Image: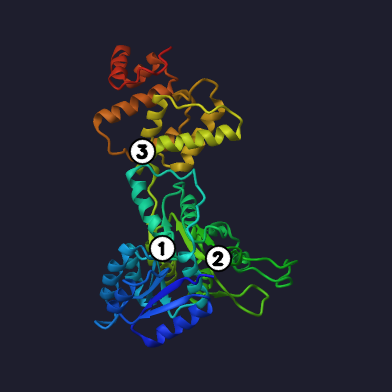
Amino acid sequence: MNQPTILVVDDDDDIRFALTLLLEQAGYRVVEADGPVQCMQLLSRLTPALVLLDMNFTRDTTSGKEGLALLAQINPLNIPVILMTAWANIELAVTGLQNGAKDFIEKPWRKEKLLSQIANHIKSVTAKPVDTSWIAQSSAMQSLETLIKQLAPTDANLLILGENGTGKSQLAKRIHLLSGRCEAPLISLNMGALAESLFESELFGHHKGAFTDAKQDRLGAFSRAKNGTLFMDEIGTLPFHLQPKLLQVLETGEFTPLGANASENINVRLIAATNQDLASAITNGQFRQDLYYRLNTFVIRLPALRERKDDISALCEHFINQFAAKYNKPILPLSASARELLKNHPWPGNIRELSHVIERAVLICNGEAIEISHIMLDYQTTQSQSIPALTLEELEKQRIVEVLQQHNQQITAAAKSLGISRNALYRRMEKYQLEGLDESF
């Protein structure tokens, strides 16, 4: 059997010896380099499956400049690089990820985690499952897509920030599917829905007889997500007095099921999400700063739907297909006027609101296309939002579309509501290419 070769680059003889011993026992062939010069000499003669790269050599002990410079030399060779850094240098490791490294490992490392990360990055590339619900056509989402494709293959803990309904759980799924853990489970846990009395049981599991209602053994979320991803949604709602229990597990890499005598090692990729301002929660004494730092090796901000309007048409098509299949209805197109109405709505409820609007439209539409009359928007919620940054013409067009929809396309009633004549309304409809509206009255 062909042994994958790993190049270990570190100026510490003891570190190289320990890694060589560990990796050879795991079935790898190991080649050592004590610095950048020897590393590049070796890479001119061989192509390892992976490079384990220390960040600091002889020049100093903290800046990581030598490691980053060497990383830049290795990148064109398309060899995956895992950085080795101390816990205090996590920011340096994140810089390395931004500059092309695939992952990082903290010193002192945990054997099981290190071997898992190495296996994930050197295994043969396999086809990833396709997630057709992920829409990223807008410039905001294209930037996000570039970022997650860089972060997904790593085991870095991620914190997703975004408003309610923006699709944070969908983003966690996307990251999981792009990771080396995609063949293992993605376990989602809503921290806001956990009963405090069951917190430890839900996360760590329990053995039969551990407490009154423990009729049988039960695996906790950390066990069910083994080798995969654990997604903790609404992490900001976790009660303050329970936060140390989670922090201890993240710091030690171990947990003990209720009623068990021995601890178990965790092997999960942790993704957390919240719509809360955790910085303010820390200031107000509602969230632990040390837990925050453990969760947010990298923070990802998910744009609100109003910030990614170029995705609305594609999202509508996705939801139309989804709900047409669910309710055994025909797949119908959106009319131009309905599409314009949806694009100009501020969407305070984000993608969740859009999904509900399209679901209702699919249910009540019996024609050949989904028209404005089938689009039921919450105007009270809409009017409570701040006015978006539109030109006067865009605001006028949006207002005309909204009033026509409110009056079921009755021109006389809409013109009266707008305070203009019917002829004036017709002229504006022609100006904004809204002649496709039903003009009956």
The answer to whether residue 244 shows anywhere in this view is no
CA gap, disc 2 to disc 3?
36 Å
**Viewer-proximal residue, 159 or 378?**
159
Q: Which residue is mark 2?
A: 227
> Which part of the image, by quadrant, shows the C terminus?
top left
Question: Which amino acid type is shown beneath numbered disc 1?
Answer: Ala
Say if 30 sits above or below 316 in the image.
below
CA gap, disc 1 to disc 2?
32 Å
Dot 2 or dot 3: first in sequence order is 2
**The residue tagged with tag 2: helix, strand or loop?**
loop
Question: In the rendering, at what x and y percent does residue 267 appear?
Answer: 54, 69
Say if 375 sits above or below 252 in the image.
above
**Viewer-proximal residue, 98 or 301?**
98
Q: Which residue is mark 3?
A: 310
Residue furthest toward the right? 215
Cβ atoms at labels 2 and 3 below 8 Å apart: no
**Viewer-proximal residue, 137 or 118?**
118
Instruction: Please give the name of the residue rendered at 32% of the width and 19% of the height, measured from the top-left corner.
Output: 429
Answer few, some or many: residues within 10 Å of disc 2's Cα (few below 14, many 20 plus, some between 14 and 19): many
Disc marking residue 281: 1
Instruction: Please give the name of the residue rendered at 35% of the width and 47% of the height, measured from the top-left corner.
Output: 142
Question: Which amino acid type is shown beneath numbered disc 3?
Answer: Asp
